[in-house]
Amino acid sequence: MGGLLMWTAVLLVLLTVGLLDTPRGAMPDLRCMLLDHSGPAALSMPGDYVIGGVFSLHYYMLSVENNYTHLPEPLRCRGSLDFRELRFARAMAFAIEEINNSSDLLPGVMLGYQIHDSCSSVSAATRAAFQLANGRDPYFFPGAPCSSSATITAVVGESGSTPSIAMSRVLGPFGIPQVSHYATCACLSDKQQYPTFSRTIPSDYFQAAALAQLVKHYGWMWIGAVRSDSDYGNSGMAAFLKAARAEGICVEYSEAFYRTNPRARVRRVAEVIRGSTARVVVAFVAPGDMLVLLAELEQLAPPPLQWVGSESWVTDPGLVRFSMCVGAVGFGIRRAIIPGLRDFLVDLNAAQVSESPLLTEFWETAFGCRLSGVSGSPGQKLCNGSESLQGLKNSYTDTSQLRITNMVYKAVYAVAHALHGLICTDRAGSPAHCDRDMPLQMIQVLRQIRKVNFTLNGNRVSFDANGDPVATYELVNWQVVDSGRVEFVTVGYYDASAPEGQVFVMHRNITWAGGKTQVPVSVCSESCPPGTRKAVQKGKPVCCYDCIPCAEGEISNTTDALDCFICPAESWPNPKRDKCIHKLIEFLSFDEILGAILATSSVAGAGLSVAIAAVFYRHKDTPIVRANNSELSFLLLFSLTLCFLCSLTFIGRPSHWSCMLRHTAFGITFVLCISCVLGKTIVVLMAFRATLPGSNAMKWFGPVQQRLSVVFFTLIQVLICVLWLSLSPPFPIKNLSHYKEKVILECSLGSNGAFWAVLGYIGLLSALCFVLAFLARKLPDNFNEAKFITFSMLIFTAVWITFIPAYVSSPGKFTVAVEIFAILASSLGLIVCIFAPKCFIILFRPEKNTKKHIMGKVPSKAL
């Protein structure tokens, strides 16, 4: 852009000088005048309509410092000739010659060309654009105004984005169409700034997105980035970095350089690449810049790097000599076959070459000799005339991978089809008629170029509203073939117009950096396995992180998870914390040891009660059974049997009915049991008072009253239980809060007040029984069993007082086990204290089972 400003300033100065030299009173000639000693075109051919071409045929331009005291000297290139760019220029000439020989496209019309060398320089490309727009002979434009003075129909070129931008700034105001074959900067799609620009190569916008998808596809989340410090490199890399960040890719460094920078700058970039931890380098670099960078890296001997390249250099045969790039991948323009091109390229002889300074330079460079009549270096041998391009192998004659060359070919044909649409009339069944003298406005040609839609050698050629083609690429891989040469092997395709899921297709194996078959790894941190989450390291990019195990109760089931998530309520993480598994279901079952022991104890207790009842029944007529109120004893044994058996309802999976049954059965049977004990205690007291003179106490507490008292006390508990079941009955629940890793199946009390009312009523009867028994414990009679009832009530009370804190604090199934143990212990305490002594006498001391002994005045230790 600086060159463009410089030459604009020069032209303004010269125009001012011309006006000052005009005699006073004379009207100056306001026609556009080219005040420039520009050289002739590098390649040219006259025609009815001329197409301009600009190519970077040389690598550098000779820098000349202008002092603005005289006209600038003609531009001169320096450095070696770029054989690949020469092939592009000659392909343009071939396409025009092919069109001129066609009977279908522009019949009877001769196309010409003017091809200029930009010397890979913005200023030279700008000057070439001026020259194509202005013409050279005469030095005045053939007519006025300047906007209609162009001598060419359209311009093909340039090979770089920055010079193409400069050219478009010049050609745009004149309305001259520009069709580039190699300028990929996405900025050129802006039609407000570049209204006449079109291209046959896709925009870097699509390539940047494709490269980001490629990098993400292979898991390269930690990369380096280098770019040319030009419009092409800066714009392309900016688009790539935006797409990469959207994919979660991190960039360790992003370096820019240009081939004309001081060597120290290029070396610094090379050292950054060598010293980085990223093993993948994405390069949006022009071929000339890449050549300089790779030459510098070659001296530093970096570790194996996986290069990911843009289309500008990844298919450039001039770079294959760098072995460090073996395994490089990138998107290249799709290959094509252009029939007859190679024959055209090699169909040159010394006589034809000597007529063109450009071709002469090429010939002498290719064969290392000097043509006759051409000055050269002292001692340089003369060409003997036997030289032939047929056997020459270089980037000029290599037509095995025509990619950018095909873009030039398509650009020329696009212009030709546009001209055909403007000056030719197609007739059905007869050749088209073309008016070779029809004057054309540049805006007409531009609009027609945007409308073209044709197929060329199997490739569709068309443009969208921004002058861009459909984005299609080949995924190219640098592979070493059997011959030892490095070749560009197509391993996949990218088609932006394809349906979703078919845009990026891989179909072959890839050789990676260092010739390996295993995909290289380039990450700042290793992937976090399932069961962990990523925690970004402070002050570093998001790709640098630590792997933190998921917290208790949380899992992550993907690699590189950003967060862990909580398992559902009834699930719990497995030991690796990568999967939610169902929590263990816990309840007191018959299958486990504790449940089996308690169930066995319950059945054994019930069996013991039945056995004692059988003993009592068999000896029901003996004094000891008769003297201890046999009716209440049998009822007590029956209630104790129910007490033992009701504990079985607490074992097993809780259900709606078992929850209601276990608490109510327990409450009612225990009240029945305590009521019987209370009745026996009252009978003892009444019996003693009945022995006193004049007492008729037994009349008030005979068998009927005993039965009624038991029924009355029991009915109160039944009423409490009925109210409980009616208003808020117990029900099964899943306790998820007590254990994090278990689900406890238990019975909710429904009403805590009702539960404690049941227990409180049992406690009240027990306390009353204990007090009465305690008062009667020293009555002087072997008949007295109050002391045994006292002991049984002490055990009963101790058990249930201990039960309360144990019940409240016991977790899970142990809460049920504590309740069962209390039932069994208290029931067993009653049997042992009340019935064990009597059974001992009945079975083992029958001599004491007499009325005399029972009514004796001396208390028996057996009782």
Image (spheres, grey):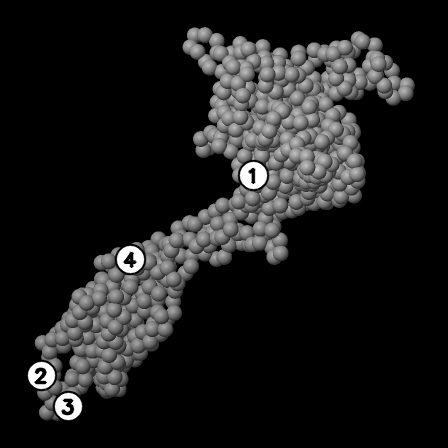
SS class, disc 4? loop
Left or right of 320, for residue 242 = left
Which of labels 1 and 4 is toward the front? 1
Q: Position of residue 452 (x, y in %)?
A: 49, 23
Q: Quadrant of residue 338?
A: top right
> Label 2, on which residue?
699
Q: Earlier in the sequence, mark 3 or mark 1?
A: 1
Name the mark on residue 193.
1
Which residue shows up at 83% across the image and 17% down it? 374
CA gap, disc 1 and disc 2: 124 Å
Nearer to me, 179 or 65: 65
Q: Position of residue 166 (x, y in %)?
A: 64, 36
Which of labels 2 and 3 is toward the front? 2
Residue 318 appears anywhere in the view: no
> Label 4, on which residue?
654
SS class, disc 1? loop
CA gap, disc 3 and disc 4: 55 Å
Nearer to me, 480 or 148: 148
> Where, quadrant-wise, is the C terminus in this rendering?
bottom left
> Label 3, on which residue?
692
Q: Position of residue 462 (x, y in %)?
A: 50, 25
CA gap, disc 1 and disc 4: 80 Å
CA gap, disc 3 and disc 1: 130 Å
